[in-house]
Image: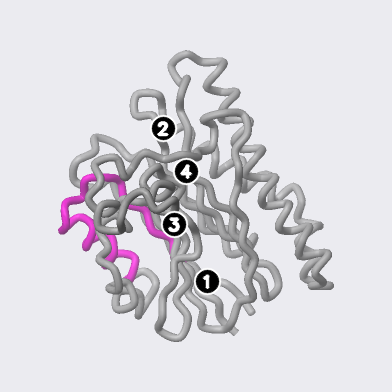
Amino acid sequence: MRTLSYGKSDVGRRRPHNEDSMLFDDELGLYIVCDGVGGNAKGEVASAESVELVQSWVRRWRKTLAAHVAEPTPENAGLVRRLLESAVQSACYMVFGMGQQDPRQKGMSSTLSSLLVSANTAFIAQVGDSRVYLCRDGKTAQLTEDHTLVNFRLKLGLITAEEAANSPGKNVITRAVGHQDYVEVDTIELETEPGDRFVLCSDGLHGYLIEGEIDGLLQGDREAVTNRLIELANERGGRDNITVVICDIEA
């Protein structure tokens, strides 16, 4: 199987500049969406550095990917999963260090949602509230968990789903790359099928999605779907930067 992708980032209608960064690399099988946190503390630097550092780390360990493609055993899959997690941890350490060295960048950090496709397996590493979705057979599921204060309170049963949707602090994230020198990374591993469509996006998009409507928005050409999603977010307010990366699995 092979991967084919497309991605686009838009500043939105209210922000003066774009703090999102993205990557879609079909040769490497790596896809990333980062949403910078920090505003004047250079969130755009944090997101761009996070993307570059994860890509560089994965490239450096391409032999691990090649071994998994040659022999897709559980042991080799475990090495790829740890490779991606280590890439995110490396980015976290470096971004935190940059903030410590430069007072103008102190406090900068970034969300990071990444997808690495190797052989017939998708590996996902997640920090923050950007998301990865999987559309299979016309049905779409959110694969990642939002690391936000509201979602944490919701999981504990302290608030209802309705209260969470209307919470004024729902964008307060509890994990970010670079906030400290270490971050807990969620990792996921799943088998892919021909026809699978993965969608990575920042909260500038998913914050506007109505529950259940995404299934009807993901059908069609990758570029057209990406543009449609960005237009939708802008039509509904465009209060944040909007980034979308689509990766299709084809036979």
Mark 2 lies on a secondary structure that is: helix
Mark 1 lies on a secondary structure that is: strand
Q: Amino acid at mark 1?
A: Leu
Which label's residue is closer to the chain start, 2 or 3? Answer: 2
- Up the image or down, 110 lies above or below 8; here it is above
Give the residue displayed 76% in from the left and 56% down from the top: 62
> In the rendered structure, does residue 215 fall within the stretch colored magenta?
no
Measured from the top left, where is residue 8 in percent x and y? Answer: 37, 56
For the residues labelled 3 and 1, the Cα–Cα distance comes to 19 Å
Q: Amino acid at mark 4?
A: Thr
Q: Dividing the picture into quarters, in which one does residue 81 lie?
A: bottom right
Mark 3 lies on a secondary structure that is: strand
- Classify mark 1: residues with Cα within 10 Å, few (<14), some (14-19) or many (20+): some
For the residues labelled 2 and 3, the Cα–Cα distance comes to 18 Å
Q: Is residue 196 left or right of residue 8?
A: right
Report the mark closest to the observer, 2 or 4.
4
- Give me the disc on residue 131: 3
Residue position marked by numbered label 4 in the rendering: 111
Which label's residue is closer to the chain start, 1 or 2? Answer: 1
Residue position marked by numbered label 1 in the rendering: 4
- Classify mark 3: residues with Cα within 10 Å, few (<14), some (14-19) or many (20+): many
Q: Is residue 21 visible?
A: no
Q: Quadrant of the C terminus?
A: bottom right
Region in magenta: 224-246
Residue position marked by numbered label 2 in the rendering: 43
Q: Is residue 152 left or right of residue 98?
A: left
Contact check, label 2 and label 4, Cβ < 8 Å: no
For the residues labelled 1 and 2, the Cα–Cα distance comes to 29 Å
Q: Amino acid at mark 3?
A: Arg
